[in-house]
Amino acid sequence: MFIEKIRHVIIVKTAFLNFALTLSATIIRPLIVEQSIVFTYMGIFNSFVLGCVFLFVKKAQPKDWQAMLLVASVMLVLLPIVLVSGGNNSHFSYLFPIIPIFVSLVSNAKYTWITTLIIVVCLLAIYFSSGLLPDYTYENVPQNKTIARTIWLTFSVLFACKFGIEFNRIISTLGNKLSEQAEIDVLTGIHNRRSIMLFLQHAMDEAKLKNTHLSVLMIDLDHFKQINDNYGHLVGDQCLRAAAQCLKQGIRQHTDQAGRYGGEEFIVVIKDANEQKAFEIAQQILLEIAQTSIEIDTINSINVTATIGLCTRSGDNLTSIEHFIELADKVLYLGKESGRNCVIKAAM
């Protein structure tokens, strides 16, 4: 998600930059140098096309294909102006190596290679079509210089492709690590509060849309303060890690999600399951926690228990995350008052 947001920002800013530079060049260039009126007409057309693309990618929801739309629009406006301004000798042709780098930043290696091959084919086609189209720059360039520039452009595009793909790989790896660090609780290895709350919000929206059941378990380790006081915080940390592993093992891997809510309190979100199924999952988690032995030293060990508050609602009865958690939290403390090490269900 983090990388996708950055890529969309790059697409929008690049689209605006393309439009702004093209429009500026169309207005300013005739005032500085003498040029054929053809370039002015092409500049007006190109500015219109790039302006439309910019407005579209800015207003539309982010999609993977928007990067290729931007590339296609750039190729659409770049190729004609290169063809009538000296082909591969045109100063506009030096923009070609930039395109693979841009694609690698906002897409993947597959599309970068495809774009690179298309550009190489275009460069060869431009070379072999030299002399067939008018050159409005009226420059006479030796054939050997044209060949040299074509070869240089081809290798530049290929190098840019390889560089862009490698850079994208590094950025993606770093982005994935950052995303993981932003979502995972360092101590327990499960989702942190921010991540689990986002998941709960998405699950609630989905349950409302499909009118399916959604359950939340509020889990609190029993006598955790006494464990910290009697055995130290390192043992307390072991208890938290062990409980987190029990949660990961007790939930359905591709449907539910567990997270640390804060301190010794955890939360589990159970999707598409009625109250009885959610209760069975809660009981299984409770049993696994109670059966887990925490080693204090080479001789002694302790067992920890937990109390669970369960709240299940159908989609049409869901109001807000805060109210949903509050209901589960209330029955959790009823369980504490009832002797702990139990699952208490909220009234439907």
Image (spheres, rainbow, N blue to C red):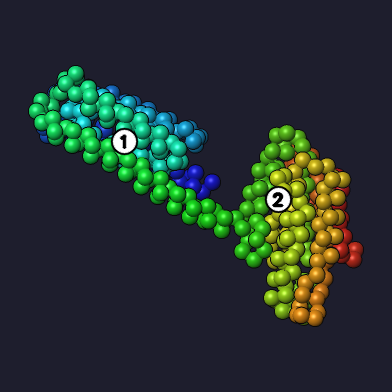
- Quarter of the image for residue 181 reads bottom right
Whether residue 43 can be seen here: no
Name the residue located 16 percent from the left edge and 32 percent from the top edge.
146
**In the image, is 121 to the left or to the right of 342?**
left
Q: Amino acid at mark 2?
A: Gln
Q: Secondary structure at mark 2?
A: strand
Quarter of the image with the C terminus in it:
top right
Q: Compute the Cα span from label 2 to label 1.
A: 43 Å
Q: Amino acid at mark 1?
A: Asn
Q: Which residue is mark 1?
A: 18
Near-viewer residue (258 or 157): 157
- Quarter of the image for residue 119 reads top left
Name the residue located 70 percent from the left edge and 50 percent from the top edge.
257
2 vs 1, front mark: 2
Q: Position of residue 62 (x, y in %)?
A: 49, 36
Near-viewer residue (265 or 330): 265
Name the residue located 66 percent from the left edge and 52 percent from the top edge.
196
What is the count of numbered marks?
2
Residue count near mark 2 (Cα–Cα under 10 Å), binned few <14, some 14–19, many ≥20: many
**Where residue 44 is drawn, which disc sits there?**
none
Q: Secondary structure at mark 1?
A: helix
**In the image, is 306 to the left or to the right of 21?**
right
